[in-house]
């Protein structure tokens, strides 16, 4: 547990066997490290790994589940969690700095050295980041990402029940592939599915207008699960297949709830090079050279902007709330720096000079 003191005072440090406050008289050390306190780290230059969200096969508090044995400190893993369960996330490298966040990577649920314990307040997908240190340093040395679950609530999984069948009754052909959201239908239910025609080489995002909906993607027959998780599911790549028809299911939750309440199913297509070209042409960085501030503006609200040194160290991370973002560079030394702008899994880097 990481705690940043807000006042000078005396605190109590309790340790129990588990999250149920169980007591015993087996000896253990209590340790404390004092430092700057650290902060959550959201940078992950290589995105999600593995590409599918991780489901825990059990939740009895006794099994260590390995999410990946070859994860890097340049990516994150997506883990499906269930409300009420307690999860302990850890790295095989004991000096790693761990951050657990919401699926968007904007809200930190917990962060700390070597392991983080988090009790889920909602059934959702979380991000599990591991970095070399509290300075958010990245590297490509393999490490395991592990998780233990206790609480026993039902483990999230794919949902294939669809009493409403296929809706609409025609396959949906995505009309454009430029990053614009395409609405399949506005009157879909939680308990039916749409068929969507995808093209190889493109990347797709799937979402529901109801933010808490659970999405499942399968092949055309509904027999092979391709991906599932809480809305949205982003960065689903289709490669090596000229054309693929999939089923796009929506349910109210990971327990496969059904409801005859209208919701939109939305699919966004990004060409293999299209979004990079769009970002390159749309992004404006000024002034350059800069003294006090730089402004980054474009046609969309970007997912994340990183300020990076020439050595590759991430100095600052900003999550924009509008199409124009200002970053204070007044305290930087003179020299060359970079900003890395990210959107829908694509990153574009711009260089600027600090005077």
Image (tube, rainbow, N blue to C red):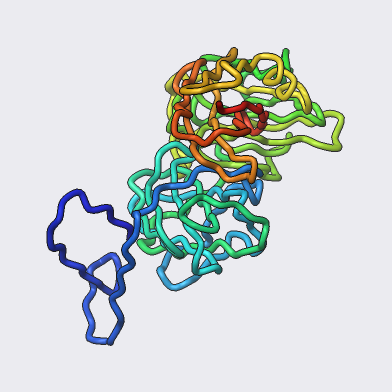
Residue 141: which quarter of the image? bottom right
Residue at screen point 49% across, 37% down: 316
Would residue 95 be seen by someone viewing this image from the given angle? yes
User: Which quarter of the rendering shows the C terminus?
Assistant: top right
Would residue 162 be seen by someone viewing this image from the given angle? no
Please tell me which residue lies in front, 236 or 34.
Answer: 34
Asked if residue 264 is positioned above or below residue 343 in the image, the reply reads above
On screen, residue 275 versus residue 352, left or right, reads: right
Asked if residue 283 is positioned above or below residue 145 in the image, the reply reads above
Asked if residue 77 is positioned above or below residue 33 in the image, the reply reads above
Residue at screen point 50% across, 16% down: 324
Q: List the single residue furthest toward the left.
A: 9
Residue at screen point 66% across, 28% down: 351
List x then y, in percent, for residue 114. 46, 64
Please tell me which residue lies in front, 65 or 11.
Answer: 11
Residue at screen point 82% across, 31% down: 200
On screen, residue 158 versus residue 124, left or right, reads: right
């Amino acid at each position: 547990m990481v705690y940043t003191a807000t006042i000078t005072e005396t605190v109590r440090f309790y340790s129990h066997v588990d999250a149920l406050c169980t007591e015993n008289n087996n000896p253990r050390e209590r340790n404390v490290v004092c430092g700057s306190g650290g902060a959550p780290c959201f940078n992950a230059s290589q995105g999600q790994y593995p590409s599918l969200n991780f489901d825990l096969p059990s939740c009895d508090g006794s099994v260590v589940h390995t999410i990946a044995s070859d994860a890097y400190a340049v990516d994150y893993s997506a883990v499906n969690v269930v409300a009420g369960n307690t999860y302990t996330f850890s790295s095989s490298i004991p000096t790693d700095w761990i951050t657990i966040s919401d699926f968007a990577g904007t809200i930190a649920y917990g962060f700390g050295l070597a392991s983080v314990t988090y009790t889920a307040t909602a059934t959702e997908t979380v991000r599990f980041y591991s970095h070399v240190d509290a300075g958010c340093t990245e590297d490509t040395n393999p490490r395991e990402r592990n998780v233990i679950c206790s609480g026993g609530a039902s483990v999230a999984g794919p949902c294939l029940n669809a009493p409403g069948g296929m809706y609409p009754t025609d396959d949906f052909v995505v009309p454009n592939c430029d990053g614009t959201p395409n609405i399949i239908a506005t009157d879909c239910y939680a308990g039916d599915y749409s068929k969507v025609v995808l093209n190889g080489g493109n990347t797709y995002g799937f979402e529901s207008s109801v933010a808490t909906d659970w999405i499942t993607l399968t092949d055309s027959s509904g027999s092979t699960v391709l991906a599932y998780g809480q809305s949205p599911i982003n960065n689903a790549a289709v490669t090596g297949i000229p054309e693929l028809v999939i089923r796009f299911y929506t349910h109210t939750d990971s327990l496969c709830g059904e409801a005859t309440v209208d919701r939109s199913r939305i699919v966004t297509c990004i060409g293999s090079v299209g979004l990079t070209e769009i970002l390159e042409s749309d992004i404006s960085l000024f002034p350059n050279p800069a003294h006090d501030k730089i402004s980054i503006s474009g046609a969309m609200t970007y997912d994340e902007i990183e300020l990076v040194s020439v050595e590759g160290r991430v100095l600052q991370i900003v999550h924009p709330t509008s199409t124009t973002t200002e970053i204070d560079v007044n305290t930087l030394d003179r020299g060359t720096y970079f900003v890395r702008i990210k959107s829908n899994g694509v990153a574009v880097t711009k260089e600027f000079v600090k005077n």
